[in-house]
Image (cartoon, grey):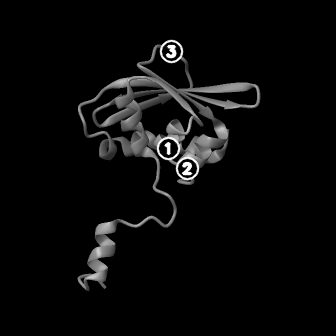
């Protein structure tokens, strides 16, 4: 488990009020495979808050991925939805939880808001 992944999970409760604004609730288990071992994270999502533990348990959804890919996700070097579509990771259960959780991942390095770029090109921003 990398330090970036640990910091990512530690940061979730503080970031939840801004990210979890929809009325969706549920539990997602994230299984990270590394070598011959799997590390489990249980994430309880509720409007405005999130609880994270290293447990296994009943979950509405399960996301299985490699620890390496998850490290790339938390650093913005990979995209969660793309990884599932390319079959680099697998997901089962309530897809809404996955779509909600993926909002916690950062944008790729160098990404800019297209509205800001357009305003700058129009001369409305310095």
- Badge 1 crowding class, 10 Å Cα cut-off, few under 14, some 14 to 19, many 20 or more, is few
| Position above or below: 123 against 91 | below
Residue 35 position, x and y percent, is 76, 31
What is the distance, in whole Å, between disc 1 and disc 2 at their CAs? 8 Å
Residue 106 disc label: none
Residue 78 disc label: 2
Which of disc 3 and disc 2 is earlier in sequence?
3
Q: Which residue is mark 3?
A: 57
Q: Nearer the viewer, residue 91 or 27?
A: 91
Q: Which residue is drawn at the image coordinates 50% and 58% (left, top)?
A: 108
The quarter of the picture where the N terminus appears is top right
Secondary element at tag 1: helix
Which of disc 3 and disc 1 is earlier in sequence?
3
Q: Is residue 96 left or right of residue 78?
A: left
- Badge 3 crowding class, 10 Å Cα cut-off, few under 14, some 14 to 19, many 20 or more, is few
What is the distance, in whole Å, between disc 2 and disc 3 at their CAs? 27 Å
Q: Which residue is mark 1?
A: 82
Q: Nearer the viewer, residue 91 or 33?
A: 91
């Amino acid at each position: 488990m990398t330090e970036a992944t640990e910091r990512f999970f530690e940061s979730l409760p503080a970031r939840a009020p801004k990210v979890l604004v929809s009325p969706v609730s549920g539990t997602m288990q994230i299984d990270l495979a590394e070598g011959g071992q799997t590390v489990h994270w249980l994430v309880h999502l509720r409007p405005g808050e999130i609880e994270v533990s290293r447990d296994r348990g009943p979950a509405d959804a399960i996301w299985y991925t490699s620890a390496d890919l998850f490290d790339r996700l938390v650093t913005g070097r990979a995209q969660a939805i793309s990884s599932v579509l390319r079959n680099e990771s697998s997901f089962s259960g309530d897809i809404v939880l996955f779509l909600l959780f993926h909002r916690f991942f950062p944008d790729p390095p160098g990404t800019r808001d297209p509205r800001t770029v357009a305003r700058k090109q129009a001369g409305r921003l310095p």
